[in-house]
Amino acid sequence: MKLALARLAVPLCLALMAAPAWAEKQYAPGISDTEIKFGQTLPLSGPVSAYGQIGRAEAAYFRMINDQGGVNGRKLEFVQLDDGYSPPRTVEQTRKLVEEEQVAFVFSTIGTPGNMAIRKYLNDRKVPQLWVGSGSSHLADPEHFPWTMAFLPSYLVEGRVYAKYILSHTPDAKVAVLYQNDDFGKDLLQGFQEGLGAAAAKMIVASASYEVSDPTIDQQVLSLQGSGADTLFTVVTPKFSAQAIRKVYDIGWRPRYFVSYTGSAVAAVLKPAGLEKSVGLVSTAYLKDPTDPQWKGDQGYKDWLAWMEKYLPGGDTADLFNVTGYVEASVLVQVLKRCGDDLSRENMMRQVTHIENLALPMLQPGIVFSTSPTDYTPVKSMRLVRFDGTTWVPFGDPIDGRLSQR
């Protein structure tokens, strides 16, 4: 285990092409010779509290870094506040992080509505909003919001990936769409429609939306079944994804079933829905699924598992959110290392916007991270995966989700 944990400290900096700044010390608020203080709001309670596990994994990764001596001799102080996935609460807690806690930057705030609510506040104050926990295309806008950097694959990219696959393999499909009625749901639906292009009007035969405050989506599922669709595409968060999977199965509807990445976690979604009811589902992936046996001999997986055993003892090794947090935290650490002693907010953004073809150990083969001062969408392609009753099994090559890549 010691060897495995040691490998976690091997720098990934070769892929971060911006020149490190080892000049005189320059510090943002929250940073000293001994400490880097930053913060996060996340839903530890509320309708999407399953996402809170991402933050727990990130905190565990930072504990490991502190045990190893910190970043360039500075310990990481990670302040986490619960926002319950409520945008007004996200604003309140973010103001507390910036104005009371005096954090250097905000990291991995989870959810589209909350991130949209705090974006202007942070950009007006030139506080980095790093690794936004949302794939909304509106949150990757370097021209208007240069202090906000995405991390997850864009919802537009993901939507186009499904559409390109359906067009190639079942061009006569009759598609029904269930989506969350907010920026997240509308953005992914837009990408899906863009990917279908002129065929969208004919192929999408029905759609239904739900509110995050709704108790169930049973009526929406029944309505979509009645449309005669033979293909179902759901743009959902964990609670509603589990409900939809269970309801579709229980009413005897057997469409080709595509579920957005946000609603595909084995531990948080498929187990509550019923693994036997989830067989055959198709989703996307950019990370290695820890339940996939093909990774058992993979060094990146072995290192991740060793970290789990030491820093998240008793944690669910089937939970993909533990991989998400691990990867997001590891990239942040590498960025901070490259900042050297210039830990000004301006230099942080220079490093964040110069990541070139970064291939991480827990990314799917063929998937890389790249950013530039004009490109705030790090992940441009995803792989399709199919659930076999135990794990998500990748199939085919990565599909480029950029609109120009047809």
Image (cartoon, rainbow, N blue to C red):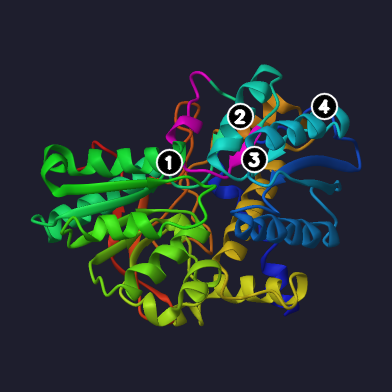
| Residue underneath mark 3 | 86
The mark that comes first in sequence, 4 or 3, is 4
Q: Circle 2 — which element?
A: helix
Which corner quadrant of the image does residue 120 belong to? Answer: top right
The mark that comes first in sequence, 4 or 1, is 4
The x and y percentages for residue 229 are 18, 58
The magenta span reads 129-144
| Kind of residue indicated by mark 4 | Glu
Q: How crowded is mark 2: few (under 14 residues within 10 Å), some or many (20 or more)?
A: some
Quadrant occupied by the C terminus: top left
| Residue underneath mark 1 | 181
| Residue underneath mark 4 | 24
The mark that comes first in sequence, 1 or 2, is 2
The residues tagged by marks 2 and 4 sit, at their Cα atoms, a distance apart of 35 Å
| Kind of residue indicated by mark 3 | Ser
Establish if 206 lies above or below 59.
above
